[in-house]
Amino acid sequence: MTIELPLAARPAEPGQQSVIKLAVLAVGGQGGGVLTNWIEALARSQGYSAQATSVAGVAQRTGATIYYIEMAPGSVAQPVFSLAPAPGDVDVMIAAEMMEAGRAILRGFVTPDRTTLIASIHRALAVSEKMVPGDGIANADEVRAAAETAARKLVMADMDSAAVRAGSVISASLFGALAGSGALPFPRSAFEKAIRASGKGVEASLRAFAAGFDLAEQGERPEAAPAMEAPAEPQGPGKTLRAWNALAARVSQLPAAVQEMAVPGLRKVADFQDTAYGAEYLDRLQGVLDRDSADLGYELSREAAKYIANAMVYDDVIRVADLKTRSSRFGRIESQMGSQDKLMTLTDYLHPRAEEIAGLLPARLGARVESSPKWMARLDRLFNKGRRIRTDSLRGFLMLYLLGGLRGWRRRSLRHAQEQAHLDQWLDAALGHLPQCYGMAIEVIRCRRLIKGYSDTHARGHSKFDKVMQGARMVATREDGPQWVARLREAALQDETGAALDGALKTIRSFAA
Amino acid sequence: MAERSFKAEVEHLRKGAGSTFTGEGILAITKALLENGVGYVGGYQGAPISHLMDVLADAEELLGELGVRYEANASEAAAAAMLAASVHYPIRGAVTFKGSVGVNVASDALANLASSGVTGGALVIVGEDYGEGSSIMQERSYAFAMKSQFWLLDPRPNLPSIVKSVGDGFALSEASNTPVMLMVRIRSCHVTGSFECRGNLHPPLTVRDALSNPQRDFNRVVLPPMSYQHEQDKIENRWPAAEKYILDNGLNERFGPKQGKAGLICLGGMYNSVIRALQRLGLADLSGNTEVPLYVMNVAYPLVQSDLLDFCEGKDAVLMVEEGQPEFIEQQLGAMLFKAGSQTKLEGKGIFPKAGEYTGQVMMDGLDDFFRKYAAHLLPGQVRAPNAPAPEIPDLSQTVPIRPPGFCTGCPERPIFASMKLVEQELGKHQISADIGCHLFAALPPFEIGGQTMGYGLGPASNAAFDGGGKKRAISILGDGGFWHNGLSSSIGNMVFNKSDSVAIIVDNYYSAATGGQDIPSSRAKNASKSTNNPITKALEGAGVKWIRQIDRTYDVTRMRATIREALTTDYDGPKVIVASSECMLNRQRREKPQRNKAIKDGARMEIPRFGVDEDVCTGDHACIRLSGCPSLSLKKLDDPLRDDPVAHIDQSCVGCGNCGEVADAAILCPSFYEARVVHNPSGLERWAAGLRSRVILWLQTRRAARRLTFDGTASGRIAQ
């Protein structure tokens, strides 16, 4: 489908052409009203007649909102302005967010014959994008491509960051971009006067205005290409470092494509446990590599390098406690909260269940406890409770610190045994497709992506994983088997309940039965 | 305290004769009321006239000076009933509410008012919430004017015309002893512009004076036999009087040439859209000078037959530009032309779509079709045969996500619906009826709670069929605004009287929040001219509810869930009502933020909470978002080749309400959430203790880091010193 553009009505008389029609498409709460007031005041100050309209009300509560302004030179006697933008009849379109720019194009408000599109490329994700269990974020590149075709003139930059850096909000940087775009026949000083006249947060607004103006005039300066940050050299006691160096040497022998995943993989695994665990990782990877082939670009090993690392680094109580007590975490939070020169308290929201406690027990004892409802109920009574841990206090910190220190114990725990068993089963299943069906092996490896989350979500991930594996067995011998597995995996990531996955499985059963 | 303050703008309402007023339509209407000597004003808030109520509230001082009584009515029905003051007394009164739901609620009072007839001018200002951006069912207020026979003005959408129509409305009302409804469309309410002021007028007779000298005229009471006489009076006297006034004073306007084979008839409110379409078709200039005969009905009801027939005389065709359906005017006009034996062809619906808004495109397409059919010679060649092919623009309909309105950041209603969703996961789906208000957003993802809404305050009433109970209990939602509007009697009273075995949840956010945060009887704010702080629970007790649970912090998801669970499973078989109270975050931030910033500046100790997600603990399954949907809880793509899915991320806009942490706890989601409180201006002792703590913590961290491999290159984090 293409958007049908309206009749190319370009009336002959000059009166109509001297009207400037400007629309602002924003997300409720972005300050579209302020921007509108500025534009209107600006036009009036320059001797223009101007009219603005908006639809307030509930649409402003985080929904898409539209503001509309028309202006004409004072020489036009009593102009009759429209109260709403019409497709194909907008001169300046300001979109305060990337998908709102897309919406403006979709609604026909951006046309190649006339429209200057000023859009901020930052994203305010819609609920529908965020709630997907996988990656539901809309494709901004498609909007950019459409904008390049649809707009007569295009100003696209991250106006939100520009404003935040200036200590202001996006309405100011967009107003600057409007000035910088040259779409309105008014000098820069007149724009700035409009901001000054409004009298609120003037200095910050003017800074953001200048930033927006520069972005429109000069475009987004390519950020100084972040010097391919060589990952910081690992540090540690001598013996450990020597062991690490040996592992690093092993990784460097791997094919380049595999290394790309194996290097971060190895770091992740060694960070999670120790160098011996890292060695196990490389052994497992070697097992895959031995059955892989250079002709196929080692794609299987590359994927395995990624997902074996993820599988080996499971999220147990020890890991969470370890991550939560690291100094790097404290530093990160401080910089995020901007609290460097102030005090900060830190409360972690934890809620352990009997399962987590049982998982910490020695494998055999843990298994017995887990199979005894009575014991599990007892553990639940003791531990299953929402806990607010003040990690900045000594007491709270020590508790997590001690838990995080159980790394040496981890390999003996029930959870570890379960994770290892599952990992082996999965890897065997994947490699079982070799050598006949290389594609199936890759797709099965990738299904590891489905296992994530904690507690119920984790369990749901497992059940989806099982379902997909079941589906994979049904299509194992088909030529399009790999595509079907990929499709199942994507379906599993589409919704929480697995409705899409069940639908896809039903389809498979209909032809595989 | 309303969401938007008009204190500054209200000063413009004092402007005297000769000065120019520049501003929003809503303010212009207020000014016009004062210029026309209004004696009392009132109404009920709701888009698009919420701001009119807010302006009146902010202008109370000025109204007092002029001797004008302002009442924030309990409902639209109450507002319409207030116009009774103009029945016996020569006092001008005006009330405002939104259409068409406002006229629905007010229809009983409006019908009685119309039957009685009025002595003083009675004006109902209706904000017609139709078309894009509307929040209600799409209907027209027009039907109410027809059925009760009061007059309906629909002025051209510019400030001078709107202001003039206020005066016209009062005068027309008095000339015909009939209440008048002034309709302003959704965008006209917020349209900006200028008009020349006149001085404000004291009402010739104030309501206070009237009280000292009570009047009654038995003939105006709606009782047989007078009610029969009222009907006759409407037709025999009031209608002709109205027609005469409209004609004598030229309330309807004509533009363009007198001659012309094809003419347009439009409602005043549609005038600008019509002119814009004519401009684009090359048939009008920017000032509205047009080559097409145009009849503009600033009075939408009644139609002045003689005037309309005169306009149609000698024309091959006229096009009725009437948005929405049914096409009441077109039907009346058709009957007129037919009965008069006219040869003029009437076009309208058919050329225009039967339903839906007349957007710029629809209007231009419609006029284009009409002129091609009846006056093709008028159209410039370029319009008739455009030579530029329309460029192809990539389709984004599959790319751009929908963005309906939703709960604001930190909204206290979110945890209520998260709790309900969690209860549903335990006990299964329930029959849930929603109500009008922000809480209706729960019907959207991620909550998807509530299947129907029958009207303001009618949530529990709309579950009445299920009051007998069953294996599962029905749940209904009611807002505090709806509770005081209509819910106490129609919903709660109904539940008590019928021994309803169901659950009602009252969402108490301290304001009529969806309409812009106006105060209501249970608001916690101190309001100089209104009685607030009347607890909902007391009203419930008074109405006879025995099972009441008051929750003072909705963010406590665990407690909220337990209470809902209890209500659904208790043995008690009477009505169960949960009052879930926490302040609307939008209003709370507006109130607290400036105070807080000032306190910090003044050196006071202050903790500012904000939530965060540990990105290395978060696994990217987004379960938290499916139970929250908070705008500040978003996603972030990590720069990590091993991670496929974006992780949860809380941005700067977080207000620290705690919902996400509470949900993660109650639903046992994950341990990723933390609350960081930045302490501004801590005491010396506090600093010292924090320094000590952080040194011990740092020592422990360094100790552990020294015994293992570390990859982040940092060992120097600190938390509080």
Image: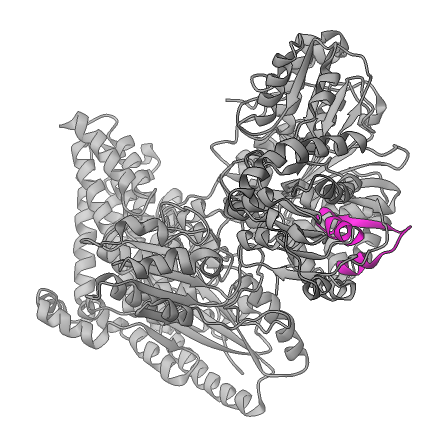
Q: Nearer the viewer, residue B676 or B721?
A: B676
- The residue lying at 42 percent from left, 51 percent from top is B435
Kindly report the secondary structure that dominates the magenta region of the rendered protein: helix
Residue B27 shown in magenta: yes
Visible residue check, residue A96: yes
Report the coloring of the rendering.
one colour
User: Would you place residue B250 above or below residue B533 in this image?
Assistant: above
- The residue lying at 26 percent from left, 48 percent from top is A286
In the rendered image, residue A52, in percent from the top left (x then y), is placed at 73, 43
Q: Residue furthest bottom?
A: B685
In the rendered image, residue A390, in percent from the top left (x then y), is placed at 40, 78
Residue B540 shown in magenta: no
Q: Locate residue A176 relative to residue B496 in the image: left or right.
A: right
Visible residue check, residue A97: no
Q: Nearer the viewer, residue B460 or B671?
A: B460
Q: Locate residue A278 relative to residue B345 in the image: left or right.
A: left
Which quadrant of the structure image shows residue A403? bottom left
User: Would you place residue B347 above or below residue A221 in this image?
Assistant: above
Q: Please identify the quadrant where the C terminus of chain B is shown.
A: bottom right
- The residue lying at 64 percent from left, 14 percent from top is B337
Q: Please identify the quadrant where the N terminus of chain B is shown.
A: bottom right
Which quadrant of the structure image shows residue B306? top right
Q: Which residues are magenta?
A: B9-35
Q: Locate residue B216 relative to residue A500 in the image: left or right.
A: right
Q: Nearer the viewer, residue B325 or A140?
A: B325
Number of residue marks: 0
- The residue lying at 56 percent from left, 43 percent from top is B226
Which quadrant of the structure image shows residue A264? bottom left
In the rendered image, residue B473, in percent from the top left (x then y), is placed at 24, 55
In the rendered image, residue B403, in percent from the top left (x then y), is placed at 50, 43
